[in-house]
């Protein structure tokens, strides 16, 4: 899963690099990357916390742990975003309010919902999924979980076909994306409950290749995007057999710091007149430093896959 997480984060970063530096559109879909993050998140949260949520862990404690795990990269990225916007237009009251909200994983009710750090929308949705997981989903059976997943999909699919669940920074768009990502999160929970860590097949490297192909197909049109999304649960299961290679572990470790900081870092790099290559190097350096800070805080010497998150 670490390798998939790293590929997904890079695909999102390349998409935003192209937009920020006004390059041709990236051939890799950021939407499928986010979908994969949520499938992985549901899987990892079920594996790590579900038994405790059924017995001795409260929902509030669970959300506190998630907040602690997700906070630092989001805070770093959003602080860079605040400094950049304030340098351009001054430190207005609405920016301070947006900054306070984003540190609580909450959106601005308007457009954009997360003006200081656009990818933070998915962290808001992640926390929504986590709250539902702690309060309800961890307490219900697998069959009931499937019913909830189907219900979420029945909201998501029509909204997608009608063009309501658009990938845009608007608050209403974020709300329409909740059913999509909740469906993915629920599928991740179901995969772990049903199969545990048992892999699908015996060639996990093909899962990474298949995911890269899915990212490309999803960028072509909407039907292929849906096909790629349907393939993602199988790709996740197939990846479970991959050995814990050091490069994959580090790819997983820097994936979330990269995801949560790359947009404001790249925007700042462009504002400073840095060439794209230097912007990429700066974004990578920030992500690596944050990953190292996590390891220092845990007292470890290398990333541990069980602690990685998916958004």
Image (cartoon, rainbow, N blue to C red):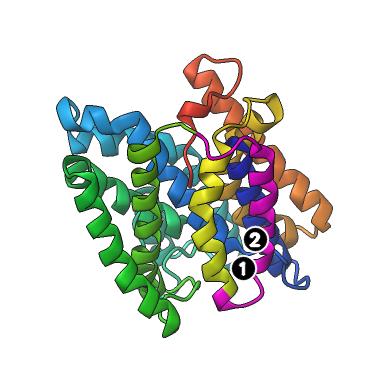
Q: Is residue 294 magenta?
A: no
- Asked if one can make out residue 17 in the rendered structure from this viewpoint, the answer is yes
**3D distance between C-alphas at marks 1 and 2:** 5 Å
Look at 69% across and 64% down and name the residue there.
216
Q: Which mark is residue 38?
A: none
Quadrant (top left/top right/bottom left/bottom right) for the N terminus? top right
Residue 268 place in picture, x, y as percent? 67, 56
User: Element type at marker 2?
Assistant: helix
**Where residue 267 sits: x, y (%)?**
66, 60
Q: Is residue 242 positioned above or below 113 on the image?
A: above
Residue 100 seen in the current view: no
Q: Residue at x 35, y 64 (%)?
A: 178
Which image quadrant for residue 93? bottom left
User: Of 203 and 95, which appears nearest the observer?
Assistant: 203
Indicate which disc residue 215 carries. 2
User: Where 101 falls versus 282 (above or below)?
Assistant: below
Q: Say above or below: 286 vs 266.
A: above
Which segment is the magenta one?
Answer: 199-223
Do tag 1 and tag 2 residues touch (Cβ < 8 Å)?
yes
Q: At x 66% / y 55%, what residue is drawn?
A: 11
**10 Å crowding of disc 2: few (<14), some (14-19), many (20+):** many
Horizontal side of residue 170 vs 217, given as left or right? left
Where does residue 73 sit, x and y in percent of width and height? 51, 41
Q: Which residue is mark 1?
A: 218
- Whether residue 209 is in magenta: the answer is yes
Q: Measuring 47% from the left and 76% from the top, which residue is drawn there?
A: 166
Give the secondary structure at mark 1.
Answer: helix
Dominant secondary structure (helix, strand or loop) of the stretch shown in magenta: helix
Q: Pinpoint residue 280: horizontal percent, then vertical percent.
A: 75, 50
């Amino acid at each position: 899963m670490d390798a998939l997480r790293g590929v997904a984060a890079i695909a999102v970063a390349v998409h935003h690099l192209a937009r920020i530096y006004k390059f041709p559109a990236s051939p890799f879909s950021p939407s499928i990357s986010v979908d994969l993050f949520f499938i992985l998140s549901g899987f990892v949260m079920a594996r790590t916390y579900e038994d405790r949520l059924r017995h001795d862990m409260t929902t509030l404690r669970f959300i506190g742990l998630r907040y602690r795990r997700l906070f630092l990269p989001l805070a770093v990225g959003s602080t860079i975003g605040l400094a950049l916007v304030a340098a351009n237009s001054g430190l207005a009251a609405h920016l301070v309010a947006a900054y306070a909200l984003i540190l609580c994983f909450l959106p601005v009710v308007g457009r954009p919902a997360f003006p200081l750090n656009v990818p933070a929308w998915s962290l808001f949705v992640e926390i929504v999924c986590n709250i539902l997981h702690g309060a309800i989903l961890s307490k219900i059976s697998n069959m009931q979980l499937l019913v909830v997943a189907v219900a979420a999909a029945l909201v998501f699919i029509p909204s997608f076909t009608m063009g309501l669940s658009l990938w845009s920074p608007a608050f209403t768009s974020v709300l329409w994306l909740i059913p999509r990502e909740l469906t993915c999160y629920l599928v991740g929970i179901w995969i772990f409950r049903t199969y545990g860590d048992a892999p699908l097949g015996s060639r996990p490297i093909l899962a990474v290749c298949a995911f890269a192909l899915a990212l490309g197909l999803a960028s072509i049109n909407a039907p292929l995007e849906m096909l790629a999304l349907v393939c993602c649960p199988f790709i996740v299961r197939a990846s479970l057999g991959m050995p814990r290679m050091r490069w994959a572990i580090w790819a997983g470790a820097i994936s979330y710091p990269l995801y949560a900081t790359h947009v404001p870092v790249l925007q700042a790099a462009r504002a400073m007149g840095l060439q794209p290559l230097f912007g990429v190097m700066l974004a990578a350096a920030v992500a690596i430093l944050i990953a190292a800070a996590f390891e220092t805080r845990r007292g470890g010497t290398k990333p541990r896959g069980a602690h990685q998150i998916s958004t």
